[in-house]
Image: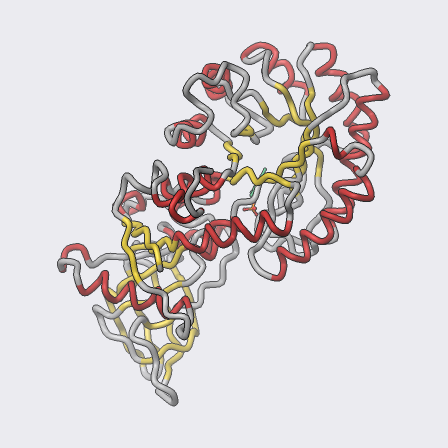
Amino acid sequence: MGGGSPMQTVLSAPGVKDGKVVSFTLDAATDEKDTVAGLIRSIIATSSPAQRTAFHVFHINTVVDLFSAWRRTLPNVRPYYAVKCNPDPALLGALAALGAGFDCASRAEMEAVLALGVGVGGVPPGANRSIVYANPCKAEPHLEYAAEAGVALATYDTESEVAKVARCHPRCELLLRLKGPDGGTTGGDLMNKYGAHAHEVSPLLRAAQRARVAVAGVSFHVGSPVSRVDVYRGAIESARAAFDAAVALGMPPMRVLDIGGGFRAGAAFDEAAAVINDALADVFGDLLPCVEVIAEPGRYFAETAFTLAARVIGKRARGEAREYWIDDGLYGSLNNVLMDHKVPRPRPLAGACPGEKTYASTVFGPTCDSQDLVVTGYQLPEMSVGDWLVFDNMGAYSTGAGSKFNGFDISEMKIYVAYSS
Ligand SMILES: Cc1ncc(COP(=O)(O)O)c(C=O)c1O
């Protein structure tokens, strides 16, 4: 990081400074969410009628605050932000400026990070340590790109992957991805898709040894998000067993422990960090001076930093029931309702007066698919066409996974970067 405050460094970072940053004043007496709603109102008021379509606000201060909380709470674990969670260039730029590395799963994600100048410019091939290519099954063209770009740390969990790495990128160092214990996830339970079982660890280490591909360490991912934070201890114990297995096979000692993602901002993060810090001290205490511990948080940094504003574009009243159509939905940034088990809690931008009558309301997305249904039986005051709904905490697995189904193209959705003083 440069000499100024973290916020100054972020505001002058590639990905942030290239776009327009809207500034506003955060009133200490007002709730942050209400202040962001005030900003949304002023964006709408100053935009032309044609521009009045659904948009996101990225409150960049949130990421700066979350990064310093991470540093304080998990001081010995460097975060490698999971780009899949939200690849917004300003978010990537802010995190790079703060000192994060990146978990990339494809060529496009690596390109997005390298476009920020992370680890490039005179970095020799094989020395780019700001990216972990954390996709255990890599397509060959993507792996060849990693070799050209000097991305030289990648995960694996099959023998076929070892052969592929030996062929396409033999100087790449590997992290053996272990199957994490069940973290009680509501959303991204990876079940059996990824991760070596305990009895597969030694055979997979031997496969790398035979192919002369170095194994630098171990990774795991306990699910996204994790509701039972105690699972990190079991996963760290399994990682230690794999470190010991490598020594028993006469391999060079491992040096990297990647504890994956699954973190949520707030009290849950403090609880997870306490488990992790204790487990690292108890299980890896003797090795820690020689082991670099990294993590792959996604939603921790992205979820609470983005707010969606969507416009009511249609309405039907049937008796006491109300139905609304809005201009974002399950094929757009609200795809997290389906794919990430998000439970949206929209609120009218105009606010609601105490005691105001509410109606059991259904909110549809804009496509012709009848399953494009955002909420149902949800209490809202009477809304009109042209009113706006605000959705908080919309940064995780939202804009990055939308589509252009029915011609509603997520890539056209505007994201305002906002800085508050
Ligand atoms: C390998 C890996 N690392 C990190 C993450 C990020 O998870 P989260 O956003 O819950 O931190 C994921 C998401 O599922 C993942 O699959």
**Residue at horizontal 68%, vertical 53%?**
272
Which percent across, then down, holds residue 255? 71, 26
**Residue at horizontal 28%, vertical 39%?**
18
**Residue at horizontal 36%, vertical 39%?**
13
Examine the rendering and report whether any part of residue 363 can be seen: no
Which percent across, then down, holds residue 113? 42, 31
**Relative to the observer, which residue lies in front, 199 or 419?**
419
Which percent across, then down, holds residue 48? 13, 58
Image-quadrant location for residue 59: bottom left
**Relative to the observer, which residue lies in front, 184 or 338?**
184
Residue lying at the far right of the rendered structure: 248
**Quadrant containing the C terminus in the rendered view:** bottom left
Which percent across, then down, holds residue 123? 47, 18
394 on left or right of 411: right
Image-quadrant location for residue 218: top right
In this view, 368 is above or below 241: below
**Relative to the observer, which residue lies in front, 203 or 132?**
132
